[in-house]
Image: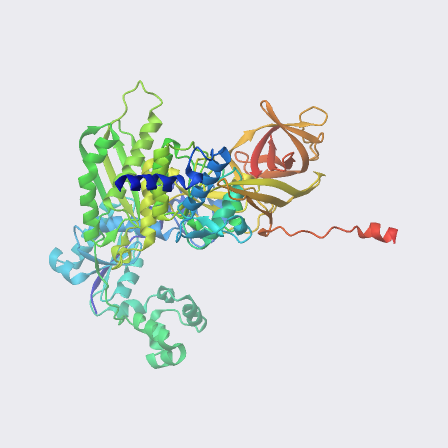
Amino acid sequence: MARSIVMWSPRWSVVAAYRDEALPEAVPDVPLALVHGGVLTDCSASAAHAGVRQGMKVREAHTLCPSLVMAARDEHRERRAFDRVLTDLAEYVPQHAVLAPGLVAFGARGLERFYGSEEAAGRMLRDALVQSEPLAEARIGIADDVFTAVTAAKHTTEAYPFRRVEPKNSALFLSEMPLDVLDDDATVSLLLRLGLRTLGDFVNLGIDAIRERLGVPGERLFRLAGGTAEAPLLVRDAPEDTRERMELAEPCSLVEQVAFNIKAPLERYDNRLRRAGVVITRVRVVIGFDDGAQQEKVWTHPRFFTPSDLLDRVRWQLEQSFRNTEVSSDVVPPSVTWVECDALEPEDALSHEPGLWGAGPDSRVHHVFSRVQGLVGAQGVLTGSSRQGRLAGDTHVLTTWGDHEQQSAQGPLPGSLPSPLPATIFSTPREISLVGDDGHAVGVSSRAELSSSPAWLVSGSSRLKVTSWAGPWPVWEKWWDPTRSRFVHRLQVVDEHGMGWLMSLCDQAWSLEARYD
Amino acid sequence: MDVDRIEQMFEYSSMSPALTLESHEPTRADVQALRQRIQVMESTRVGSRVIPVHSAVSSIFPRGGLNTGSVYSVDSSTSLLWVLLAEATQQGTWCAVVGMPDLGVAAAEELGVNVDRLVLVPSPGSQWMAVLGALIDVVGVCALGAFPAPSERALSTLSGRLRERESTLLVRSSWPRVDAALAVEHQWDGVEQGRGILREHHLRITATPRPGQTALSCDVVIDHGGLRTATRMAPVIDLAHHRKAG
């Protein structure tokens, strides 16, 4: 049994959400709640003050606190935020065992020896956490085993954030605890129905009776409740700091200058991560300019980034930002002063090692496509996938080569474009006029009827005779959202050469959406 | 002795009348026939691989598929493009489409293209030749938008690369020295004056090879089930009319 110090940060998921840059509306002090499956999993102190509680339904919480900001729970985000804190803690304590985001255990013996006493070590850890993450709160529990220490940490208050269980007193401490600290809902519910209230009651049943009725899981719970569980601490080293800021010796305003200056630092950065046994598959690149502006972008790689890949991404990002500022050419373009790379979700290098005989033909394909991206820009090389859509342009999604495709489960979509689908879809619909047999432009009435029979497709000086047509079909897309809603009429037309066209009428103007060639 | 030999030699050469200018004036037709024979021999590359195409259209290719190392010119029909790429992508060959921004990827999937093996470079701009040169290394079929033919010298370099890498190029404009030019005639069925829906796409695909070889064509139909060979329909008998007459 290893005496342990457990540090618990209550409402860690809320802190992580406040720190997430992807949630701009979640700023500290705003009442915030995290939602999973329609139920609140956690909420901020300000929300709790308004009466919002864990386990509430979303609607109920909104009634209690109308200004409540909701965010989806994201375990990745919590882990990422906690890893950042642990990196800072590495200065004080080299090894730790993360039990959950916001809950971490340390071996007590070494810390006690170094800091004089367990209390001093606990205070130091608490200060270190708050220093690294001012929004967080830290509670400390110290006991003979991890389970008791966790229970102790969770039964502290804001006013008394320490709870230390004297050596060999675990069983006594736990016997007063309610059953639900066991974290096994089914068993706890059964025991409550049997009339048991505390862990002490449970232990008093005796190991034989519990083993007989609850089997091996019951035996494990018995050991936990008696403070005799021998779960060894799986300690690991502090996570590698995946962020690196590269300051340029002098501000540069040319892409190639910047690329030249950061080539060596990027190689060092990659080397450092490789030595730590991780590779980068997703990286956030932030570029800082001398006028204080920052420009950031997240890049993804289908395998992992090599230093030259990273350099390419920085170069593309710079080219793009320079292109955007080129409009005002009389102003001196801003110069780059620093570049920062932050590997998001670093992956174990072992799972990316090339095989003994190379990584197969697909790595060659990837290499060539990346080279083409170097020629035409990252967004110039695409892969496509189909989906259901009511308008021609919605029937496919184009993804930049190397980016992860956002998969969305899609059921059948009523009113989607019928098969066979048009082989040519104009990336920008072409304006055209549709003239009826009465010589006037064809319109659509409010009852979705054409004002006259279509006779000619006219575009500039050229025209095509319409031989047959079908439709119109009204399509009202996203009617619930006034900013994105669109009401169009679809019409299929066949011209004198037997070619099929898909047209749409939006705001009294016809356009060609697609060609059935 | 020597003189005799020389005389004999002259006699010998004069024995072949077809090759002498005096005895037989070569007509324009002869020259063309010879050129055709040379071209036929040129285009036969024994041992070069064939990229398979859908069985409904394989009949227009003398070897049952696209010759690797060759250039085909295709017209602007995108369905034709997808039909030509379908079988190759399904067998795991990477295919690329360069310089065509207006593509319906959903239609490609309907026609049997495995889009996981398809990469698109919609607007390569002036870099198209460099992009093409890079892509040829790894893709089996590369389709190119309507770009003007490169210079004769660049074209022969390109052909060499295509042969070496065993890939095929489809071009949407008429380039010199193509293996065949593929053209499509369309007919859509299913719509009338305001009723129905575009249901059946009839295509007649014609392959016009180098001069001297016969043009081949095939009729196919695309409907909601994908691509199939057009079958000659039995004449529709109007039963109601029949009964009245009977």
B145 vs B50: above or below = above
The residue lying toward the viewer, choosing from B48 and B244, is B48
Query: From this viewpoint, is residue B4 visible?
Result: yes
Rendered location of residue B109, percent (x, y): 51, 49
A330 vs A353: above or below = above
Which residue occupies 66% across, 32% down? A466
Which residue occupies 62% across, 50% down? B230
The residue lying toward the viewer, choosing from B235 and A357, is B235
Q: Is residue B219 left or right of residue A105?
A: right
Rendered location of residue A200, percent (x, y): 33, 72
Which residue occupies 57% across, 33% down? A512
The residue lying toward the viewer, choosing from A336 and B235, is B235
Q: Is residue A123 left or right of residue B229?
A: left
The residue lying toward the viewer, choosing from B219 and A223, is B219
Task: Tell me the quadrant of the picture where the N terminus of chain A can be found.
Answer: bottom left
Rendered location of residue A388, percent (x, y): 54, 46
A424 vs A172: above or below = above
Rendered location of residue A218, percent (x, y): 36, 74
